[in-house]
């Protein structure tokens, strides 16, 4: 999960169901992650931490107690919150939790009404402790490889030896990996691993509130344009500039025949907010 990036990550954003944030990419093509660290009380994390507020939710559909799915309503309609609630394991990634996350994300990706997904902790003081090492210790050697592959399929931002040098440079990446150093929020932001550092609030959900603000900014944007922009960014980062520009041109070409593009032009002409439908 954004390898070795401590702090409370604000959210995720996907092509059709976009997870809010500003940081690394994981959870499949088009998904985007954004980092926010809210106060020193939140330990190393990958999401918006703090206890879950109860207001503004239309429902609480529990696949199991460890993962809670909530669809927000009113001005937040189109935003879904995935709340991790595995307090006894400090929200560490077990086989069961990975299975539930995979199932939930797959379902939300196919729901056109879902525009933004926020992944957060419902356990005060921590988002995610990383892998469940107690469970890992009980696995035999033949189980470890397939399990790690499953995590990578769900959270495709893991791979610290490859992603970290690309994000912060080889020298600093080696320093952090070789020392196993844990960074606080300010340090993580300084090296570019997270996007926001926040003062914790009394409710303990400052990172979640920031994620929600970002989600609201993303909601009115055109789904088609957002999807191809993500594709252009993600693929373009892996190639040279000339190839990257060619990828951008090809992605833009996908928007030309869409109704959303014509709606955007018409809205500009009529000086009104566009009403995108993702078509």
Image (tube, rainbow, N blue to C red):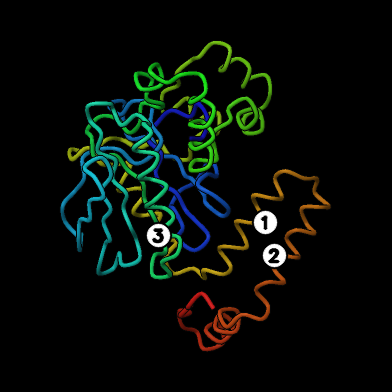
Q: Are marks 1 and 2 in contact (CB under 8 Å)?
A: yes
- Using residue 134 as the reference point, say whether residue 258 is left or right of it: right
Res 40 quadrant in image:
top left
Distance CA(mark 1)–CA(mark 2)? 6 Å
**Which of the pair 163/136 is nearer the observer?**
136
Q: Nearer the viewer, mark 1 or mark 3?
A: 3
Label 3 Cα neighbours within 10 Å, binned few <14 / some 14-19 / many ≥20: some
Label 2 Cα neighbours within 10 Å, binned few <14 / some 14-19 / many ≥20: some
Label 1 Cα neighbours within 10 Å, binned few <14 / some 14-19 / many ≥20: many
Q: Which mark is residue 108?
A: 3
- Using residue 69 as the reference point, say whether residue 169 is left or right of it: right
For marks 1 and 2 on the same chain, the one whose residue lies earlier in the sequence: 1
- Looking at the image, residue 200 lies above or below residue 44: below
Residue hosting label 2: 251
- Using residue 239 as the reference point, say whether residue 106 is left or right of it: left
- Looking at the image, residue 202 lies above or below residue 268: above
Res 213 quadrant in image:
bottom left
Distance CA(mark 1)–CA(mark 3)? 23 Å
**Residue 255: horizontal and vertical position, in percent?**
65, 74
Residue hosting label 1: 232
Residue at x-position 19% and y-position 48%: 53
Residue at x-position 80% and y-position 59%: 246
Residue at x-position 25% and y-position 69%: 74
Tell me the SS state at disc 3.
helix
């Amino acid at each position: 999960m954004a390898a070795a990036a401590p702090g409370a990550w604000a959210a995720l954003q996907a092509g059709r169901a976009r997870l809010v944030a500003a940081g690394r990419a994981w959870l499949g093509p088009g998904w985007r992650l954004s980092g926010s660290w809210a106060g020193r009380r939140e330990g190393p994390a990958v999401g918006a931490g703090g206890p879950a507020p109860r207001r503004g939710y239309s429902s609480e559909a529990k696949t199991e107690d460890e993962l809670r799915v909530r669809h927000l309503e009113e001005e937040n309609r189109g935003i879904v919150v995935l709340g991790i609630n595995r307090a006894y394991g400090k929200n560490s990634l077990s086989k069961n939790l990975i299975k539930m996350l995979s199932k939930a994300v797959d379902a939300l990706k196919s729901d056109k009404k879902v525009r933004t997904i926020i992944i957060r902790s419902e356990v005060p003081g921590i988002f995610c402790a990383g892998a469940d090492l107690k469970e890992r210790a009980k696995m035999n050697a033949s189980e470890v490889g397939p399990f790690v592959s499953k995590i990578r399929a769900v959270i495709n931002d893991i791979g610290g030896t490859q992603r970290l040098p690309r994000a912060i440079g080889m020298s600093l990446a080696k320093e952090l990996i070789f020392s196993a150093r844990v960074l606080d929020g300010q340090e993580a932001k300084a090296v570019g691993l997270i996007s926001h550092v926040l003062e914790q609030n009394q409710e303990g959900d400052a990172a979640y509130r920031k994620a929600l603000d970002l989600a609201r900014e993303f909601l009115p944007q055109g789904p088609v344009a957002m999807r191809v922009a993500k594709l252009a960014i993600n693929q373009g980062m892996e190639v040279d500039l000339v190839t990257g520009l060619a990828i951008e041109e090809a992605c833009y070409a996908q928007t030309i025949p869409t109704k959303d593009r014509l709606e955007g032009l018409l809205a500009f002409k009529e000086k009104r907010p566009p009403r995108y439908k993702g078509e």
